[in-house]
Every structure is written in structure tokens, then in C-alpha cells.
Image (spheres, rainbow, N blue to C red):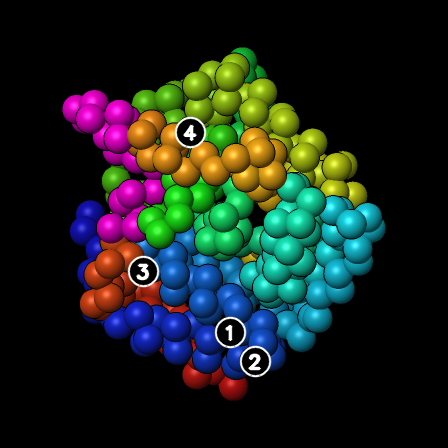
């Protein structure tokens, strides 16, 4: 099965997303933040977190689960710990309000943490950590979601896809950055593979009857598996703890139990940490890092994490977007 695509410029992607969000209850500030995040995902080739997410954002607005006019509230708990109440709003605006304070504290004290509560995160995680590394800091973040992944050895979903992202600064250059699900594949990628009729690698997940399959649509109805067996499983467990109880929020199964099932992003928490390599080490380590990267890149067949996204970012031209998706979002933009 081959899906039909249409070319859209990055500006057209942004304007379509923002207008659709505003038409369905988001105010200017929230719509701008979400549309920026979605456009940056399309720009960098992360289509499973680009316009593909807009119908879900809008479902949450239409059901009133998400407050499209939310104004996040930041509390300085200690000089290096901040708590953000996202007020049942979308996560991108909470990031705009909270990460700047996190950065300033980490630059002064060497490290700082941000606990985000009552937010609805539906995007990639690399924008948060890359922003932190633009200021010379190491960034680490994680979120949980709703049960979609069976712990290693099991066939019942308990973990979310539980992504984490990490970024290391490189002055004057793109940071080292990775953003990955602890599931064998992100849920959005499974859904796109199912939509387009593409098989996925064996071991990605199980059918509803508990059998291994390469059929993405069967896995979407069944369960995903963690990457790397028990090793990915324990990392997923760690993220449940960091993104739930540590920040005063819920485990994935609790998030699902209180959700209204509208198909939009559930309420949950996010953990974000910023560290200063200079303050922690007591010296400038940038030359040491570059020597390591030089050796890394000399190995045939390797690619620095984040390099593909950064390469895609250099292309400011139009992007190919699924035509049916464009039609859906256009209807959502124009319906009264």
C-alpha cells in the first residue's frame, strides 16, 4: 500500500496546524507553542510526531479534557528544583514557561530539575533537551503515557512507550542528542506503519493473541515489546518512576484509568534535568568531547545520535505530507 502525499512548506505546515488548533478551542499562545513543536518535527523528519499528532490534540480540545487557554504556573521549590503546574494544558507551553528557569538555575548551581504536573505531552522529546544544550548544559527528560508495552517476559501491557531524551552540548555545533522510546518502536511509528501497510521487524510486538507478528495493525491492537528484552524493560520501569511518583504524577496505568478515552494525549507528568559540565567537572571539557567524537566518527558505519535530524533541518524546502492527513486537518480547521 502506498499513501498519497502532498508537498507543504514549513510555513504552510505551521499555519495549518495553528489554525486548526485555534478553530477547536486553543488560544493564540497555546496554538503557537504546539504548532511550532509539530512543525519542527516535520522539519527534522520525525513525521510520527508532526502533523500526524494534530487530530489527537484537537480531540482533547473538543472533549474539554485539555484547557486550550491554560497558563502554566511555575513554583521555585528550592533554588534548583522547580515545579510546574501545566493547568491541564499542552506540554509545549509548559516548556516555554519552565525550561528558561531551569537553565538559569543549572548555569548558576551546576544542576537543576523541573517537575511538570498536569500536562498533556504528545510530542517528541528532543526539543526540550536541545534547548537546554543550546545554553551549554546537558539535558535529560522522560515521560510515561498509557499502557502499551508488556514488561519483558509478559504479554500484558503495563508500561507506556516511555521515551527518554538526552542531549550533550557542543559549543558552536549541533549537540549530541538522542530521543527514543523504551518500546521497540514508538506507538506513532506503529500507527503510521499500520496506516501505510508496512511490515515491522519481528520482535516489535505481539498480536492480541500473544503471538509475535510483523503486522503493525495487529501489534496496534495487541502489545508492544520493550527494546533489548529485560534491559529495555528495566529502563521503562525507571521512566515510570521518574515521570510519575518523582514529579507528583501517575503511573501509565493510572493515567489511562482517569482518561476519558477521546484519543487525545492523556494527563501526566514530565521529568527534566539540566546539568552544567563546566561546574560539575571544574573545567572546560569541550576539546575532550570533540576528540571523542572524532574517534567515534572514524569508525565505519556509525552515525552520531541526532545527526540525521540535524541534516534534515538544513533543508528548508517543502515536506511530503500524507494527503488524507492534510484533508483531515483542513476539515478540522474549517469546521464551525
Reading the image, the residue beneath label 3 is 43
> Does residue 167 appear left or right of residue 323 in this picture?
right
CA neighbours of label 1 inside 10 A, class few (<14), some (14 to 19), many (20+)? many
Seen as rendered, the residue at the extreme bottom is: 336
Q: Residue 201: image x %, image y %?
A: 30, 27
Which residue appears at 20% of the width and 47% of the height?
1
User: Separation of disc 1 and disc 2 at Cα?
Assistant: 6 Å
Q: Are marks 1 and 2 in contact (CB under 8 Å)?
A: yes
Q: Secondary structure at mark 3?
A: helix
With respect to residue 256, does 121 lie above or below?
below
User: Separation of disc 2 and disc 4 at Cα?
Assistant: 36 Å
Which residue appears at 45% of the width and 58% of the height?
53
Magenta region: 294-311
Q: Is residue 240 visible from the viewing direction of this image?
A: yes
Give the label, 4 or 1, closer to the camera.
1
Is residue 87 part of the magenta span, yes or no? no
Reading the image, the residue beneath label 2 is 28
Q: Secondary structure at mark 2?
A: helix
CA neighbours of label 3 inside 10 A, class few (<14), some (14 to 19), many (20+)? many
Reading the image, the residue beneath label 1 is 32
Q: Residue 256: image x %, image y %?
A: 67, 44
Q: Are marks 4 and 1 in contact (CB under 8 Å)?
A: no
With respect to residue 150, does 264 lie above or below?
below
CA neighbours of label 2 inside 10 A, class few (<14), some (14 to 19), many (20+)? some
The one nearer the camera, 78 or 61, is 78
Q: Are marks 3 and 2 in contact (CB under 8 Å)?
A: no
Amino acid at each position: 500500500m502506498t499513501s498519497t502525499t502532498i508537498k507543504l512548506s514549513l510555513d504552510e505546515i505551521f499555519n495549518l496546524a495553528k489554525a486548526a488548533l485555534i478553530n477547536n478551542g486553543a488560544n493564540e499562545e497555546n496554538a503557537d507553542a504546539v504548532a511550532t513543536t509539530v512543525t519542527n518535527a516535520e522539519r527534522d523528519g520525525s513525521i510520527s510526531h508532526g502533523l500526524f499528532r494534530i487530530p489527537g490534540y484537537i480531540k482533547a480540545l473538543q472533549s474539554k479534557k485539555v484547557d486550550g487557554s491554560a497558563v502554566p504556573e511555575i513554583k521555585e521549590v528550592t533554588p534548583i528544583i522547580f515545579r510546574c503546574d501545566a493547568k491541564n494544558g499542552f506540554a509545549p507551553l509548559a516548556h516555554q514557561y519552565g525550561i528558561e528557569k531551569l537553565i538559569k538555575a543549572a548555569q548558576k548551581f551546576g544542576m537543576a530539575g523541573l517537575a511538570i504536573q498536569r500536562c498533556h505531552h504528545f510530542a517528541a522529546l528532543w526539543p526540550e533537551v536541545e534547548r537546554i544544550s543550546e545554553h551549554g548544559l546537558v539535558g535529560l527528560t522522560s515521560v510515561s503515557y498509557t499502557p502499551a508495552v508488556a514488561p519483558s517476559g509478559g504479554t500484558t501491557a503495563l508500561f507506556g512507550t516511555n521515551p527518554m531524551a538526552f542531549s550533550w552540548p557542543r559549543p558552536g555545533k549541533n549537540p549530541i542528542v538522542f530521543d527514543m522510546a523504551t518500546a521497540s518502536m514508538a506507538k506513532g511509528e506503529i500507527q503510521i506503519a499500520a496506516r501505510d501497510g508496512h511490515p515491522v521487524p519481528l520482535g516489535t510486538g505481539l498480536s492480541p493473541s500473544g503471538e509475535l507478528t510483523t503486522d503493525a495493525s495487529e501489534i496496534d491492537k495487541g502489545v508492544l515489546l520493550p527494546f533489548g528484552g529485560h534491559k529495555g524493560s528495566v529502563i521503562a520501569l525507571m521512566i515510570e518512576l521518574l515521570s510519575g511518583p518523582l514529579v507528583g504524577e501517575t503511573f501509565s496505568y493510572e493515567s489511562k484509568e482517569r482518561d476519558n478515552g477521546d484519543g487525545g494525549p492523556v494527563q501526566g507528568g514530565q521529568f527534566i534535568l539540566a546539568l552544567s559540565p563546566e561546574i560539575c567537572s571544574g573545567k572546560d571539557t569541550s576539546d575532550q568531547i570533540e576528540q571523542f567524537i572524532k574517534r567515534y566518527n572514524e569508525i565505519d558505519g556509525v552515525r552520531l545520535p541526532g545527526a540525521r535530524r540535524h541534516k534534515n533541518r538544513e533543508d528548508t524546502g517543502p515536506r511530503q505530507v500524507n494527503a488524507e492527513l492534510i484533508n483531515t486537518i483542513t476539515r478540522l480547521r474549517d469546521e464551525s
